[in-house]
Image (cartoon, grey):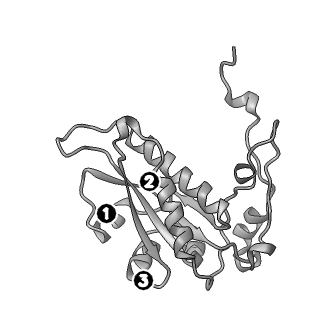
Amino acid sequence: MSLASAPVRTAETSVPLLPVLAERWSPRAFDPVAPVDEDKLTAALEAARWSPSAANTQPWRFIVARRGSEAFDAIVANLMGFNQVWAGSAGVLIVAVAELVDAEGKERRWATYDLGQAVAHLSIQAHHDGLHVHQMGGFDVDGLRRAFDIDESFEPVSVTALGTVGDAESLPEPLRQREQAPRTRLPLADIVVVND
């Protein structure tokens, strides 16, 4: 599927958003042969690198694995449930790791929050450049820890599939329905608790 034919699933918002935010969505159908442009991948990782963090601690690390590599296969092997069915078609899998304890043994309380911001920046830059991402929490943390010899001061928090959108018809039925379902979110009034 070419970028020109990739589906656009613009969010319905109460006020206009930047198009890159309104049009961002998380597909499960990725093109299993399309390569990921290395400059676009680097730009997404640079966006993550330049995201904000508490006291500029930058408590994020990324395991970046391209389709066809042993590292990619190790990540796929540690995905759970339906994630293992579709994520192997992505061009790149990225394990997002938070440094929970610094070199002196002090807890980095905001590390997972900061890592989340970094991955959000990555996803927006990728979408801006015509790529898509899908973030996953369904994976074996200990399995990834063993596969990549991740120190106990670090915690794998999410896995991101990155690549070119593929054909939703390639997905098994339950996933195909989810892929084609309308995008939904709770109303703004339900998530803003105080608005004085």
Q: Distance between the residues labelled 2 and 1?
A: 22 Å
Q: How far apart are marks 3 and 2 (CA)?
A: 24 Å
Q: In this view, does 4 lie to the left or right of 50?
A: right
Is residue 83 among the parts visible in the rendering?
no
Say which residue label 2 marks: 49
Residue 107, x across and y down, in percent: 27, 37
Amino acid type for the residue under numbered disc 2: Arg
Q: Assign a secondary structure to mark 1.
A: helix
Nearer the observer: mark 3 or 1; the answer is 3
Query: Disc number at residue 69?
Result: 3
Q: Circle 2: is it few (<14), some (14-19), or many (20+) Cα within 10 Å?
A: some
Q: In this view, does 15 lie to the left or right of 193?
A: right
Nearer the observer: mark 3 or 2; the answer is 2
Is residue 57 among the parts visible in the rendering?
yes
Residue 170, x across and y down, in percent: 71, 80
Q: Assign a secondary structure to mark 2.
A: helix
Q: Residue at x 68, y 65 (%)?
A: 27
Among numbered discs 3 and 2, the one appearing first in the sequence: 2
Q: How far apart are marks 3 and 1 (CA)?
A: 18 Å
Residue 50, x across and y down, in percent: 46, 50
Say which residue label 1 marks: 145
Is 155 above or below relative to 179?
A: above
Q: Report if the CB atoms under discs 3 and 1 are less than 8 Å apart.
A: no
